[in-house]
Image (cartoon, rainbow, N blue to C red):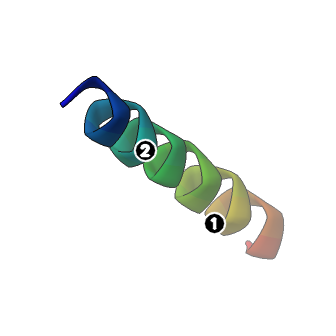
Amino acid sequence: MSYKTVWCSNIKYVSFKIFFYVY
């Protein structure tokens, strides 16, 4: 469970960073 939560958070963070970088 914990691992999944961390992974989800990481994905969100990466996605946000990529979005900011691309835009």
Residue lying at 69% horizontally and 52% vertically, measured from the top left = 17
Q: Could you classify mark 2 by the number of other residues whose Cα lies within 10 Å: few (under 14), some (14-19), or many (20 or more)?
A: few
Can you identify the residue that label 2 sits on? 7
- Judging depth in this view, the residue of 7 and 18 nearest the camera is 7
Residue lying at 45% horizontally and 49% vertically, measured from the top left = 12
Eyeballing the image, is 5 above or below 14?
Answer: above
Residue 9 position, x and y percent, is 41, 37
Q: Which amino acid, by three-letter code, is at mark 1?
A: Phe
Eyeballing the image, is 1 above or below 15?
Answer: above
Q: Nearer the viewer, mark 1 or mark 2?
A: 2
Residue 16 position, x and y percent, is 57, 53
Can you identify the residue that label 1 sits on? 19
Q: Could you classify mark 1 by the number of other residues whose Cα lies within 10 Å: few (under 14), some (14-19), or many (20 or more)?
A: few
- Judging depth in this view, the residue of 13 and 21 nearest the camera is 13
- Judging depth in this view, the residue of 2 and 22 nearest the camera is 2
Residue lying at 56% horizontally and 43% vertically, measured from the top left = 13
Q: Which amino acid, by three-letter code, is at mark 2?
A: Trp
Indicate the quadrant where residue 20 lies.
bottom right
Element at badge 1? helix
Residue lying at 73% horizontally and 72% vertically, measured from the top left = 23
Eyeballing the image, is 4 above or below 17?
Answer: above
